[in-house]
C-alpha cells in the first residue's frame, strides 16, 4: 500500500511542476507585495513558487517523505522490477525535476528583486531630465547651440526699464509744473488788459446819452416820415446828430482798446497752448515706457512661471516615483529576504528535498531504519544556497537639489512668479536704487504722472494657480499673501479580510498627495472607488466591487435534474446536480455575470407515440408522455365503438400501446322514411360508410338530398332535405274569383275546396296537380260585367275602357276638349248594368257685372260658351273710341272689353292758376270734378269744364294775391309809404332812414305773395382803429354800421377806466377806444441756457435780447408774448450734447451714462484694468465726442502654456493697444507658431500652429502584451506596457521615428496556454498544434450532437486554458399537440447529447413508451408506445337537437361534424374533448319557436295555443266567419309567425269622403287576402297618394300622401289698394274677400299652381297730391292725371330756370308727387371798370330772385341795375357818372 501511494504521488508531483490547482488565486507579476503573497479562503498567507503555493508543495513533499518512511515499517524492502523502476523514477524526480524547479524559481525571484532596484534608476533619470535646461535656474550662458539668458538677465532688463520709465515720469512732472506757471502768467496778462479796458469804459460812460437817445427815438416814432425835421428838439449846444457822432467816436476808441487787450490775451494763450503740447508728448513717452516695462515684466513672469511649473512637475514626478520605488523595495525586502521570505521558503524546500534524497538512499542500504533516522534527526541546515544579493543592498538615497525649489509648497519657491519671495527677489527696483516698487517720488501732485510701479502678474502661476493646484498640488493665486504650510498627515490602510474582490495599489497615503488606485478582481464586477480619509490616521474607504453572480437555468432545462444551489457567486460557485432518471449529471458555472450556469448529461424519461393510431380507430389526447407525469388518454374514433385503453411504455423512448376499439355498422331506415328518396347502398360499415341518395320529388330550398350515418352500431342511417310530395297553390292571378279552403295539399290525402268569390258567377271546381310541387287547378267561375252608359250621359267625356268586369272594373275617363271638371266613374251595381259618369261640364266665360267697366260700355251678351261665344258692345256717352270684346282665354274667366275711354280736360298753365288752389277729383268729362279755393281769400273760385277733348278747363272768380311788405321794412334803412299792394295796381314810395345814405327805389313784386323790393339805401359804416390802438383791448365787432353799431370792449391788461368803444360820426371814420392800459410781457420762469437783456417788456415796443449761455449752442431768439402777463418766449438754444467716443477709446473703461448734455454732463467710469482713476472730459462743441482719461489700458492674459504644449513664448507687451508677444515651436514640435491678440482685455491671447509628431498604435499586437496609451505625441510619448501572466521580462513601448508610424512593443516572452478542462471541451473535437502565444494554433470542430461555429480564443495569462466557444447542443422541439394527446410528458432536456424526456400513456400502451430524440437541430422528437386517444359520443340529452356525423373520434385526427336537427335553429359547433375517453361537446343549437301572426290574419280564426316550440308545435284553429275547417302550420324558422289556412279573411271598408279629402280611388279588391286598391291625388292637391291596407275586418283602409295646393299672398304694393280678409289660401277651399280702398269692385282670383300668388283685380290705386307751391317754384306743371294707376303729370323748367324737369309718381295715395331737375339761372358780376362808379350791395344774383342795391359813389345820378338776359351773363349798371 505504501508503495502504491508513493507510486501514485510521483506522477502527480511531477505534473505539478508546471501546473496549478483549480482554485489557486493567480495574479500577474507586478512590483508589489501582492505579487508575492496571496490570501486564500483560509485567511492564511501563502508564498507562490513557480505557480504553486509553498505550503501545498511542502505538504506534498512531506507526503512523499512519509510514504518513503512508511516503507521502512515493512520487514523487507519491496523488490522486483517494478519497485526498482519507480524508485529510479523518484530519484530522477528529486535530482532533476525538484532541484531544477527550485533553481528556476530562485532565478525568477532574483529577477524580481533586481527589478525593484532598477526602478530607482528610472526615477533618477526622470529627475535629472526634468531639471536640465531649460528648467534650470541659470545665470546666463549657452546650452547646446542656443544662448540662454536666464531669469537674472530678464530681471535686470525689467528693472532697468523701470528706471528709464521713472526718468520719463520726472520729465513729465517738471513740464506740468512749468505749464502751471505759464498759465498763471497768461491769466495775469489777460486779466490786467481787460480790467484796464473795463475801467476806462466805466469812467467815461454815465448813461446820460442813452436817455437822450431814447427821448429822440420817441420823437421820431411819433413823427410821420414826411414831417418837417425842423421840429427836432435841441440838446443844448449840440444837436442830436452831433451828439451821436461824438458817442460813436468814443466807442470806436474803446473798441480799439478792447482789441488790443484781446490780442495780448490771445498771444499769451497761444504760447501756453504750444508749450502744453510739449507736455503731452512727454506724457506719451512716459506711457510708452510704462507699456514697454509692463511687457518686459510679463516676459519675466511668464518665463519664471513656465520654468517653475515644469520644474515642479518633474520634481513631483520624481517624488511620486521615488515613493513608489521605496514602497516596492520595502515590500521586496519583506517578501524576499530572510527566513520569512522567499529565501527561507526556498531553503525549507531544499532541506526537505535533501531529506527525501537521504531517505531514498537509506532505503537501499542494509541498515535502512538507522540511516533513515539519521536523515531525520540530522536535518541539513540552511546554508543560504538561495540568498538574493539585493537583500544585502541598502536602499538608494533620495537626491535633493536646490533647483527643485520647494515644489511641495510652491508658495515658498522664490523663483516661481506670484509668490511673496519671488516679489522680494525679482521686483527689487533699479540697481542704482533697489528699494522695490513703487519707486519713491518727490511729493504727491494729482497732475503728475502716477508713481512707477509693477503691474499685476498675469502669468498662469498668478491668474490660474487654482487650476494648476488641481493638477500639481499648487495653491490658489496668492497676490503676495504669505502661505503657511500644514504638517503632512496620512490615511491608514483599511483592514481587508479574505478574498474581497479588489486589487489595490497604494502609491501614497498622504492626505495632501493621496495616490491609491484599485480595480475589481476577476469574477467581480463594478467600478472600484477609493475615498480618501479626512482625518489623520483614519482608513481610506474602498467600495464598488461585488461578486459576479450566475442565474439558474430555466425550469424547462431543470426538469430532468435534481439541483442544490449552495452559492451562485462566481468566486465561490457551488451547485450539485443529479439526474432524475437516466444519464450522468454535470454542472458548469456561467462565463459572464447574469448568465445561467450550465447543466447537462441527463436523458429524457418519456414514451413515444404509436404510429397510425388514427387509422386504427383511436383518438388520442397526449397531455404528458413523461413516465413521471404520465397523462395520455384515448377514445374510439368516429365509426368505431368499444372502450379505448392506453398502456404506457415499459422502456423510455418506446411507443405506448392502444386497444379496445372496433368498426361499427349501420342498418336501413323504415319504408315510411324511404318514401320520398331514391337510394343506392354501397357500404354500411364505418368508417367506410357509403350510400348514394336523391329526392323523388324536390329538396328543401338551398339544400340537396343528404344521408347521415348512424351514431351507434345496428342503428339506421338518416335521410334528410327531401320535401314530401304535395301540390302547390295556384298563382294569385289564378285564384282571383275563388274562395279556397286548403285542408291538405299533399298528394296522398289531397283536400282542397273552392267557391266563386264576390263579383264572380258560376260553379267552382278543384283539380289535383299531376306532379309534385305543381299547382292544383281552379275552374268554373267567371266575373260579372258592366255596360257603357248612353251617348247623352257620356257626351262630355272621353273614355278608356280597360275592364268592365266587376271584380277588376277599370274604366278611365277624362273631360273632352271643351269641357272641364273632375270626372268620376262608378261601377255598376248589378251584372249587365251601366257604369256611371259624373264631374265634367262644358267650358264658358264668366259674365261681367256692370261695375266692372264703369258704365263706359253698352254690352249685349248672347252666348258665353267658349265653343259659340257671342258678345258685342258700344261706347257710352262722354266716352270715345272703338269698343272691342275679347273672349276669355280660359273657362270661368271673364271676357274682356276695351277701346272706349272717357274724354278729358287738360290742366290750365301755371300763370292762369297762380291765384288759385285747386284739387282735381276727375278731369274726365263723364265724372269731371275740380275743387277750387282762392289763394287771396277773396272771391269765389270756380273750375269750368272744357268744351272739347284735350283742352284746359278754366279757373275764375278770385282776386289776385297782393304783394307783401319786405321784412322789417322800416328797420333796414328805409322809410316806406304803401298806397296799394295789388300787383296790378301797385303804389309804394320810400326814402333813406337815419344812418343810411343813397337813392331809394321801390320795385313791385313779380307775382302775388312775394315781397316788393327796396333798393338804393345802404348803411353808413365806421372803420376799425389801427392795431396799435387796439392792442390793449379785447374787441368784439358785431356791427360797424352806424345804425346798428355794436362793438364790445374789454381790457386785455389793466384798466385806466371803464373800457368802451364810441361810434364814429360819419361814414368811413374809425370808431374810438378808451379805458385800458398798455400790455406787458412777463419774464419766463426759467431762462436756463440764455443770457437775457430786458430793455422794454411792453408788447407794442417789445425790446428784449438774448444770447446762448455757456454750454449751449444755437441762435437765441426772443418772441414777445401774445397776451398781457404771459411770459415772452425764449428759443433757439439747446444744450451742447457730446457724442460717445469710438469703441477703441472705451475699451479700457466701464461706463455708466447719466447725461451727455454739457451743462449737466455726468458719466461714471471705472477702469477695466483696475489701474488708474477714470474720468470723462466733456466735449467743447456740440456733437463732438467726450474723452476718457485716467485708466491704464487693459491687457491680455497669458494662456496656460508650458513647454509640454509645444511653444516657447516671449511676451514683450500684453496691453491691448500695444500687444506684442512672439512665439516659436518648442523642441520636438513642427509648424509655425501664430499668436493672436485677445478680443478684449482680461482674456488670454491665443497661440497655435505647432503640432507634435504623433505615433500610431500597432495594427497587430502579440497576445502576450497589454498596453494603455496615455500620449502618442513624441514629446510626451507615454504608453504603459505589461506582459500577460508571470513574465519575468521588462516590457516597454519604443516610440516611432516618424509621424504616423506605429510604436513598437518589446520585452515580453511568449505565453503558453493549457488545455481546457473536460467539461469545457464537451461538444468539441480539438486539434492542438501549438499552445504558445507567438505561434498559437489550435483548431476545433463541433462534436456529434452539437451544432454551431466553433471559435478558439487564446488565453489571457500563461498556464491558463485557451477558450472554446460557438458550439451548442442540438435541441429537439416538442411534437405537435395533436401527436401528444395520448402522452403525459416530462421534458428535462431537449438537447440531443443530454436528451431527457419522460413519457407515459394516457391511453393503453402498445409497447415500450418513450420519447425518441431528433437527429437534426430544431426537429421534433418522436413519441412511441401509446394507443391514440378517442373522444366518446355525448349522452342523448346532450345531443338532442343535433344531427351528428362522426368521421373520426380519434383525438389526433378528430373529425366530427354536426348540424341543428329539424325544428332546431342556430349554428352547430363541435369541440374536441380535452382528455381521452371524455365526450366531445356539442353547442350552438336551440329549440326553434314560432310567434303568432298579426291580428289581421288571426281575426278570421279562433285560436287555442298549446305550444309554439317547433318540435312540439300545437295550435288549434277554428273559423270565425265561415263554416270551414281551419289549420295552424308551424313556422319554417325561429322567430317567424306560424301559418293559418282554411278560413276566409274579412274585407276592408272604404274611407269616408275620399274625393273631398283630395284622393281619386280605384278599388279592385278590398279583401284582406287579395287587397288591391290604388289612388291618386285629386285636382287641387299635390303629393304621391299611398294606400295602406286595413288591420282587420270591417275597418277602413288608410289614404295618405296628398295635401292641398296653397296660394301665397301678393306683395304689399299689390295689396295697397285693397282691404283683404283671408279665410283660406288652399286651392280646393280658396276664400279671400277683397274690398277697394279707393274705389272699384275688388276680387281675389286663385293661383294656378301650388305656391304661386293669387291675383287681385278691380280696385283703383288712389291719387297723388300736388306738391306745395314753393316746391313748384321754377317749374311749369301739366297734371293730366294724378291717379296712381293712370298717373300722367309732366313739367318743364320755368322762365329764369335751367335744367331738365323730372316728375316722380308718389308711392302712396294722398302723398305728393315730386318734381326735380331745375335750378335758377345766375347773373355774373360786370367788370371792375363798370362797377367803379357804383356802391353795390348784392342780395341775389339768381335771375328769378335777382336783387342788387346800387348807389352812385359821387352822389350824382340815380344808379339802376338791369338783370342779365341769360344764364352766366353780367348784369348791367346804369345811371352814375364816371369818377375821376
Image (cartoon, rainbow, N blue to C red):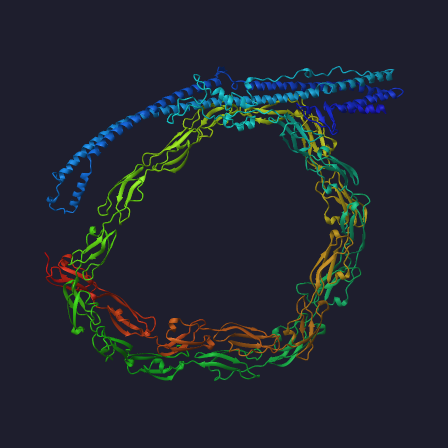
Above or below, comparing residue 1315 to residue 700 in the picture: above
Asked where in the image residue 829 lies, by quadrant, the reply is bottom right
Left or right: residue 1012 versus residue 144 is left
Left or right: residue 577 versus residue 170 is right
> Visible in this render: residue 263?
yes
Picture coordinates of residue 753 (x, y %)?
67, 77
Picture coordinates of residue 1462 (x, y %)?
71, 65
Picture coordinates of residue 179 (x, y %)?
32, 25
The answer to which of 1064 and 1501 lies nearer the viewer is: 1064
Picture coordinates of residue 128 (x, y %)?
57, 18
Above or below, comparing residue 217 to residue 1175 in the picture: below
For the point 79% across and 62% down, the residue is 715
The answer to which of 695 and 221 lies nearer the viewer is: 221
Above or below, comparing residue 204 to residue 994 in the picture: above
Q: Quadrant of the C terminus?
A: bottom left
The count of marks equals 0
Left or right: residue 152 versus residue 1496 is left
Q: Quadrant of the N terminus?
A: top right
Above or below, comparing residue 1557 to residue 1275 in the picture: below
> Visible in this render: residue 607?
no
The answer to which of 659 and 1223 lies nearer the viewer is: 1223
User: Hey, which residue is sitting farthest right in the picture?
Assistant: 75
Asked where in the image residue 1693 lies, by quadrant, the reply is bottom left
Amino acid at each position: 500500500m505504501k508503495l502504491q501511494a508513493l507510486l501514485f504521488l510521483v506522477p502527480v508531483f511531477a505534473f505539478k511542476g508546471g501546473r496549478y490547482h483549480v482554485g489557486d488565486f493567480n495574479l500577474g507579476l507586478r512590483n508589489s507585495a501582492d505579487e508575492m503573497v496571496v490570501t486564500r479562503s483560509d485567511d492564511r498567507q501563502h508564498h507562490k513558487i513557480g505557480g504553486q503555493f509553498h505550503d501545498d508543495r511542502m505538504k506534498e513533499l512531506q507526503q512523499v517523505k512519509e510514504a518513503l518512511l512508511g516503507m521502512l515499517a515493512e520487514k523487507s524492502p519491496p523488490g522486483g522490477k517494478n519497485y526498482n523502476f519507480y524508485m529510479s523514477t523518484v530519484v530522477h524526480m528529486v535530482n532533476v525535476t525538484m532541484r531544477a524547479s527550485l533553481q528556476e524559481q530562485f532565478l525568477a525571484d532574483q529577477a524580481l528583486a533586481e527589478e525593484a532596484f532598477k526602478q530607482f534608476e528610472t526615477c533618477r533619470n526622470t529627475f535629472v531630465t526634468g531639471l536640465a535646461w531649460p528648467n534650470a535656474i541659470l545665470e546666463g550662458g549657452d546650452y547646446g547651440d542656443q544662448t540662454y539668458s536666464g531669469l537674472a538677465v530678464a530681471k535686470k532688463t525689467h528693472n532697468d526699464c523701470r528706471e528709464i520709465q521713472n526718468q520719463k515720469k520726472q520729465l513729465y512732472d517738471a513740464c506740468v509744473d512749468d505749464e502751471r506757471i505759464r498759465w498763471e502768467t497768461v491769466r495775469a496778462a489777460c486779466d490786467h488788459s481787460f480790467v484796464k479796458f473795463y475801467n476806462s469804459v466805466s469812467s467815461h460812460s454815465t448813461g446820460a446819452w442813452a436817455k437822450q437817445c431814447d427821448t429822440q427815438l420817441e420823437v421820431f416814432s411819433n413823427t410821420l416820415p414826411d414831417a418837417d425835421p425842423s421840429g427836432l428838439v435841441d440838446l443844448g449846444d449840440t444837436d442830436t446828430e452831433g451828439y451821436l457822432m461824438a458817442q460813436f467816436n468814443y466807442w470806436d476808441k474803446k473798441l480799439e482798446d478792447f482789441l488790443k487787450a484781446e490780442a495780448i490775451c490771445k498771444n499769451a494763450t497761444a504760447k501756453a497752448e504750444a508749450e502744453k503740447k510739449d507736455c503731452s508728448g512727454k506724457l506719451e513717452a512716459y506711457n510708452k515706457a510704462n507699456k514697454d516695462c509692463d511687457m518686459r515684466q510679463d516676459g519675466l513672469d511668464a518665463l519664471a512661471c513656465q520654468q517653475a511649473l515644469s520644474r515642479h512637475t518633474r520634481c513631483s514626478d520624481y517624488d511620486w516615483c521615488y515613493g513608489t520605488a521605496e514602497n516596492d523595495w520595502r515590500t521586496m525586502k519583506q517578501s524576499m529576504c530572510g527566513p520569512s521570505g522567499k529565501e527561507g521558503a526556498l531553503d525549507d524546500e531544499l532541506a526537505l528535498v535533501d531529506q527525501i534524497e537521504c531517505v531514498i538512499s537509506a532505503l537501499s542500504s542494509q541498515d535502512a531504519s538507522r540511516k533513515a533516522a539519521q536523515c531525520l534527526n540530522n536535518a541539513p541546515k540552511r546554508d543560504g544556497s538561495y540568498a538574493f544579493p539585493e537583500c544585502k543592498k541598502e536602499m538608494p538615497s533620495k537626491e535633493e537639489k536646490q533647483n527643485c525649489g520647494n515644489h511641495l509648497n510652491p508658495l515658498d519657491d522664490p523663483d516661481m512668479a506670484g509668490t511673496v519671495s519671488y516679489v522680494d527677489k525679482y521686483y527689487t527696483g533699479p540697481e542704482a536704487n533697489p528699494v522695490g516698487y513703487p519707486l519713491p517720488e518727490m511729493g504727491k501732485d494729482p497732475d503728475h504722472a502716477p508713481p512707477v510701479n509693477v503691474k499685476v502678474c498675469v502669468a498662469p502661476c498668478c491668474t490660474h494657480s487654482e487650476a494648476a493646484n488641481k493638477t500639481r498640488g499648487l495653491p490658489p493665486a496668492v497676490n503676495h499673501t504669505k502661505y503657511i504650510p500644514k504638517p503632512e498627515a496620512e490615511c491608514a490602510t483599511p483592514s481587508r479580510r479574505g478574498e474581497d474582490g479588489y486589487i489595490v495599489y497604494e502609491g501614497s497615503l498622504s492626505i495632501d498627495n493621496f495616490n491609491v488606485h484599485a480595480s475589481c478582481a476577476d469574477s467581480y464586477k463594478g467600478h472600484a472607488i477609493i475615498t480618501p480619509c479626512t482625518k489623520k490616521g483614519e482608513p481610506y474607504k474602498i467600495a464598488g466591487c461585488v461578486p459576479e453572480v450566475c442565474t439558474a437555468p430555466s425550469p424547462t432545462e431543470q426538469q430532468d435534474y435534481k439541483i442544490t444551489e449552495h452559492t451562485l457567486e462566481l468566486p465561490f460557485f457551488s451547485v450539485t446536480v443529479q439526474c432524475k432518471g437516466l444519464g450522468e449529471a454535470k454542472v458548469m458555472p456561467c462565463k459572464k455575470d447574469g448568465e445561467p450556469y450550465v447543466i447537462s448529461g441527463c436523458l429524457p424519461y418519456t414514451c413515444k407515440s404509436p404510429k397510425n393510431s388514427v387509422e386504427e380507430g383511436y383518438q388520442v389526447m397526449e397531455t404528458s408522455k413523461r413516465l413521471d407525469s404520465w397523462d395520455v388518454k384515448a377514445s374510439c374514433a368516429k365509426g368505431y365503438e368499444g372502450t379505448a385503453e392506453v398502456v404506457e411504455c415499459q422502456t423510455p423512448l418506446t411507443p405506448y400501446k392502444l386497444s379496445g376499439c372496433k368498426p361499427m355498422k349501420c342498418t336501413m331506415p323504415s319504408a315510411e322514411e324511404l318514401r320520398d328518396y331514391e337510394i343506392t347502398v354501397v357500404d354500411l360499415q364505418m368508417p367506410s360508410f357509403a350510400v348514394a341518395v336523391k329526392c323523388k320529388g324536390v329538396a328543401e330550398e338551398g339544400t340537396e338530398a343528404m344521408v347521415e350515418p348512424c351514431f351507434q352500431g345496428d342503428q339506421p342511417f338518416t335521410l334528410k332535405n327531401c320535401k314530401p310530395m304535395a301540390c302547390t297553390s295556384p298563382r294569385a292571378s289564378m285564384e282571383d274569383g275563388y274562395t279556397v279552403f286548403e285542408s291538405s295539399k299533399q298528394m296522398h290525402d289531397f283536400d282542397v275546396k273552392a267557391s266563386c268569390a264576390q263579383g264572380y258567377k258560376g260553379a267552382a271546381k278543384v283539380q289535383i296537380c299531376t306532379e309534385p310541387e305543381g299547382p292544383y287547378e281552379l275552374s268554373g267561375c267567371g266575373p260579372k260585367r258592366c255596360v257603357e252608359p248612353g251617348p247623352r250621359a257620356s257626351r262630355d267625356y272621353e273614355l278608356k275602357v280597360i275592364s268592365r268586369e266587376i271584380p277588376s272594373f277599370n274604366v278611365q275617363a277624362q273631360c273632352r276638349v271643351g269641357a272641364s271638371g273632375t270626372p268620376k266613374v262608378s261601377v255598376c251595381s248589378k251584372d249587365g248594368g251601366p257604369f256611371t259618369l259624373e264631374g265634367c261640364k262644358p267650358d264658358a266665360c264668366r259674365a261681367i257685372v256692370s261695375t266692372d267697366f264703369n258704365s263706359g260700355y253698352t254690352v249685349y251678351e248672347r252666348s258665353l260658351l267658349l265653343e259659340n261665344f257671342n258678345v258685342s258692345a258700344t261706347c257710352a256717352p262722354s266716352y270715345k273710341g272703338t269698343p272691342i270684346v275679347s273672349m276669355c282665354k280660359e273657362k270661368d274667366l271673364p271676357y274682356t272689353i276695351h277701346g272706349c275711354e272717357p274724354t278729358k280736360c287738360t290742366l290750365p298753365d301755371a300763370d292762369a292758376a297762380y291765384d288759385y288752389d285747386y284739387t282735381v277729383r276727375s278731369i274726365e268729362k263723364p265724372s269731371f270734378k275740380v275743387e277750387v279755393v282762392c289763394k287771396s281769400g277773396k272771391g269765389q273760385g270756380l273750375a269750368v269744364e272744357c268744351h272739347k277733348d284735350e283742352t284746359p278747363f278754366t279757373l275764375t272768380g278770385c282776386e289776385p294775391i297782393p304783394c307783401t311788405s319786405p321784412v322789417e321794412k322800416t328797420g333796414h334803412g328805409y322809410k316806406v309809404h304803401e298806397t296799394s299792394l295789388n300787383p296790378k295796381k301797385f303804389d309804394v314810395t320810400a326814402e333813406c332812414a337815419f344812418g343810411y345814405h343813397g337813392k331809394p327805389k321801390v320795385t313791385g313784386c313779380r307775382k302775388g305773395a312775394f315781397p316788393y323790393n327796396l333798393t338804393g339805401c345802404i348803411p353808413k359804416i365806421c372803420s376799425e382803429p389801427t392795431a396799435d390802438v387796439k392792442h390793449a383791448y379785447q374787441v368784439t365787432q358785431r356791427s360797424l354800421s352806424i345804425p346798428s353799431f355794436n362793438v364790445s370792449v374789454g381790457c386785455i391788461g389793466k384798466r385806466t377806466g371803464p373800457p368802451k368803444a364810441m361810434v364814429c360820426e360819419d361814414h368811413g371814420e374809425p370808431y374810438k377806444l378808451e379805458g385800458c392800459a398798455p400790455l406787458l410781457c412777463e419774464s419766463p420762469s426759467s431762462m436756463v441756457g440764455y443770457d437775457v437783456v430786458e430793455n422794454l417788456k411792453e408788447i407794442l415796443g417789445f425790446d428784449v435780447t438774448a444770447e446762448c449761455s455757456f454750454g449751449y449752442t444755437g441762435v437765441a431768439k426772443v418772441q414777445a408774448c401774445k397776451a398781457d402777463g404771459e411770459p415772452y418766449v425764449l428759443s433757439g438754444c439747446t444744450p451742447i450734447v457730446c457724442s460717445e467716443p469710438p469703441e477703441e477709446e472705451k475699451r479700457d473703461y466701464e461706463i455708466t451714462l447719466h447725461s451727455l448734455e454739457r451743462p449737466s454732463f455726468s458719466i461714471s467710469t471705472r477702469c477695466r484694468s483696475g489701474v488708474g482713476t477714470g474720468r470723462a472730459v466733456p466735449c467743447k462743441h456740440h456733437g463732438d465726442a467726450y474723452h476718457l482719461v485716467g485708466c491704464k489700458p487693459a491687457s491680455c492674459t497669458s494662456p496656460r502654456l508650458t513647454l509640454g504644449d509645444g511653444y516657447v513664448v516671449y511676451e514683450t507687451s500684453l496691453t491691448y493697444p500695444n500687444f506684442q508677444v512672439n512665439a516659436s515651436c518648442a523642441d520636438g514640435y513642427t509648424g509655425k507658431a501664430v499668436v493672436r491678440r485677445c478680443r478684449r482685455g482680461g482674456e488670454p491671447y491665443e497661440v497655435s500652429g505647432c503640432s507634435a509628431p504623433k505615433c500610431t498604435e500597432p495594427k497587430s499586437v502579440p497576445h502576450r502584451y497589454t498596453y494603455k496609451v496615455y500620449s502618442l505625441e513624441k514629446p510626451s510619448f507615454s504608453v504603459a506596457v505589461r506582459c500577460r501572466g508571470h513574465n519575468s521580462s521588462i516590457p516597454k513601448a519604443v516610440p516611432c521615428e516618424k509621424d504616423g508610424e506605429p510604436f513598437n512593443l518589446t520585452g515580453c516572452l511568449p505565453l503558453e496556454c493549457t488545455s481546457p478542462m473536460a467539461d469545457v471541451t464537451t461538444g468539441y473535437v480539438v486539434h492542438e498544434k501549438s499552445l504558445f502565444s507567438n505561434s498559437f494554433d489550435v483548431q476545433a470542430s463541433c462534436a456529434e450532437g452539437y451544432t454551431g461555429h466553433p471559435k478558439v480564443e487564446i488565453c489571457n495569462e500563461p498556464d491558463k486554458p485557451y477558450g472554446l466557444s460557438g458550439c451548442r447542443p442540438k435541441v429537439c422541439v416538442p411534437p405537435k399537440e395533436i401527436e401528444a394527446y395520448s402522452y403525459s410528458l416530462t421534458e428535462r432536456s431537449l438537447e440531443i447529447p443530454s436528451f431527457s424526456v419522460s413519457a407515459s400513456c394516457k391511453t393503453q400502451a402498445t409497447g415500450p413508451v418513450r420519447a425518441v430524440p431528433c437527429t437534426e437541430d430544431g426537429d421534433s422528437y418522436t413519441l412511441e408506445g401509446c394507443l391514440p386517444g378517442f373522444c366518446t359520443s355525448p349522452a342523448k340529452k346532450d345531443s338532442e337537437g343535433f344531427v351528428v356525423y362522426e368521421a373520426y373520434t380519434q383525438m389526433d385526427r378528430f373529425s366530427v361534424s354536426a348540424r341543428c336537427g329539424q325544428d332546431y335553429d342556430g349554428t352547430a359547433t363541435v369541440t374536441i374533448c380535452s382528455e381521452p375517453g371524455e365526450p366531445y361537446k356539442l353547442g350552438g343549437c336551440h329549440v326553434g319557436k314560432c310567434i303568432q301572426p298579426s291580428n289581421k290574419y288571426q281575426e278570421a280564426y279562433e285560436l287555442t295555443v298549446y305550444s309554439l316550440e317547433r318540435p312540439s308545435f300545437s295550435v288549434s284553429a277554428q273559423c270565425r266567419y265561415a263554416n270551414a275547417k281551419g289549420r295552424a302550420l308551424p313556422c319554417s324558422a325561429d322567430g317567424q309567425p306560424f301559418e293559418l289556412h282554411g278560413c276566409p279573411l274579412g274585407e276592408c271598408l272604404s274611407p269616408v269622403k275620399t274625393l273631398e279629402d283630395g284622393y281619386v280611388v280605384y278599388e279592385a279588391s278590398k279583401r284582406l287576402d287579395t287587397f288591391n286598391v290604388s289612388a291618386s291625388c285629386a285636382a287641387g292637391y299635390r303629393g304621391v297618394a299611398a294606400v295602406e291596407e286595413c288591420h282587420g275586418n270591417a275597418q277602413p283602409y288608410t289614404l295618405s300622401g296628398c295635401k292641398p295646393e296653397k296660394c301665397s299672398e301678393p306683395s304689399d304694393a299689390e295689396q295697397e289698394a285693397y282691404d283683404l280678409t283671408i279665410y283660406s289660401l288652399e286651392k280646393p277651399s280658396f276664400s279671400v274677400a277683397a274690398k277697394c280702398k279707393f274705389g272699384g269692385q275688388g276680387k281675389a282670383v286663385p293661383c294656378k299652381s301650388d305656391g304661386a300668388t293669387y291675383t287681385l283685380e278691380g280696385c283703383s290705386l288712389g291719387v297723388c297730391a300736388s306738391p306745395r307751391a314753393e316746391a313748384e317754384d321754377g317749374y311749369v306743371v301739366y297734371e293730366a292725371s294724378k291717379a296712381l294707376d293712370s298717373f300722367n303729370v309732366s313739367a318743364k323748367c320755368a322762365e329764369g330756370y335751367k335744367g331738365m324737369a323730372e316728375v316722380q309718381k308718389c308711392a302712396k295715395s294722398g302723398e305728393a308727387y315730386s318734381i326735380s331737375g331745375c335750378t335758377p339761372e345766375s347773373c355774373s358780376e360786370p367788370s371792375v371798370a363798370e362797377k367803379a362808379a357804383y356802391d353795390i350791395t348784392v342780395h341775389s344774383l339768381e335771375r328769378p330772385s335777382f336783387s342788387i342795391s346800387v348807389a352812385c359813389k359821387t352822389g350824382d345820378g340815380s344808379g339802376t341795375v338791369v338783370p342779365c338776359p341769360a344764364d352766366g351773363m353780367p348784369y348791367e349798371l346804369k345811371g352814375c357818372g364816371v369818377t375821376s
